[in-house]
Amino acid sequence: MAAEGVPAAREALLRRMYQVFSTDERDAFVPHCLAPDVDWPNVLDGVRLHGREAVQAYWARQFAAGHPLVRLDGVRLDEDGEAVVATVGLGMRDAQGDHWGDTVEHVYRFGEDGLVTRMDVRATAA
């Protein structure tokens, strides 16, 4: 089901990103989704990361600590009509299975080449 107003190519890219995040395909897909100078949040340390390699290192650190999961629940255009908001369930996989917790919004901005140039995380309304 297409999200109203979201360009099809952007929606398809985000859906693929969330499909591969928790798999071994993650690193190979990075050049196909993130701009070389992407600006990305490091939620663990409260800082911003710059560049694909920094994002990949951050993800590697997350997977070394556990097995994070993300579930894309929907996409929509942000109020500015430019950014795409992904509503995302966050979870963790362990020996007992998958455990889901918070839902957040990931806000994506794209370059002219269609790659993600910036991502922000914001809490969802209660």
Image: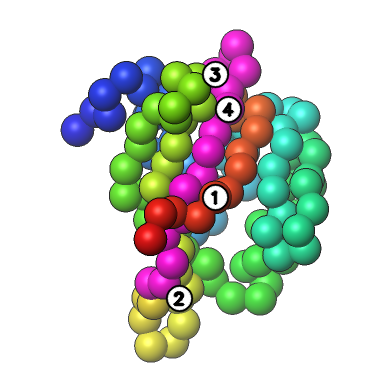
Instruction: Return the disc, 3 or 1, that comes first in the chain's sequence.
Output: 3
Of all residues, the one furthest to the bottom in this rendering is 96
Residue 8 in sight:
no
Circle 4 SS class: strand
Segment colored magenta? 100-114
- Measure the C-alpha gap from mark 2 to mark 1: 23 Å
| Residue linked to disc 3 | 114
Q: Is residue 24 magenta?
A: no
Q: CA distance from mark 2 to mark 3?
A: 31 Å
Q: Which numbered disc flags the more N-terminal residue, 2 or 4?
A: 2
Helix or strand or loop: what does disc 3 sit on?
loop
2 and 1 marks in contact (CB < 8 Å): no
Q: Callout 2 environment at 10 Å: few (<14), some (14 to 19), or many (20+)?
A: some
Q: Earlier in the sequence, mark 2 or mark 1?
A: 2
Q: Mark 3 packing: few (<14 Cα in 10 Å), some, or many (20+)? A: some
104 drawn magenta: yes
- Residue matched to label 4: 109
Question: Badges 2 and 4: C-beta atoms under 8 Å apart?
Answer: no
Q: Position of residue 94 (x, y in %)?
A: 46, 82
Q: Quadrant of residue 52?
A: top right
Give the numbered dot on residue 1. Answer: none
Towards the viewer: 75 or 10 = 75
Is 97 situated above or below 63? below
Q: Secondary structure at mark 2?
A: strand
What amino acid is found at the position of numbered circle 3 in the picture?
Gly
| Disc sitting over residue 122 in the figure | 1
Indicate the quadrant containing the C terminus: top left, top right, bottom left or bottom right. Answer: bottom left
Look at mark 2 in the image and give the residue it sits on. 93
Vertical arrangement, residue 106 with respect to residue 1, above or below: below
For the residue pair 12 and 87, the one nearer the viewer reads as: 87
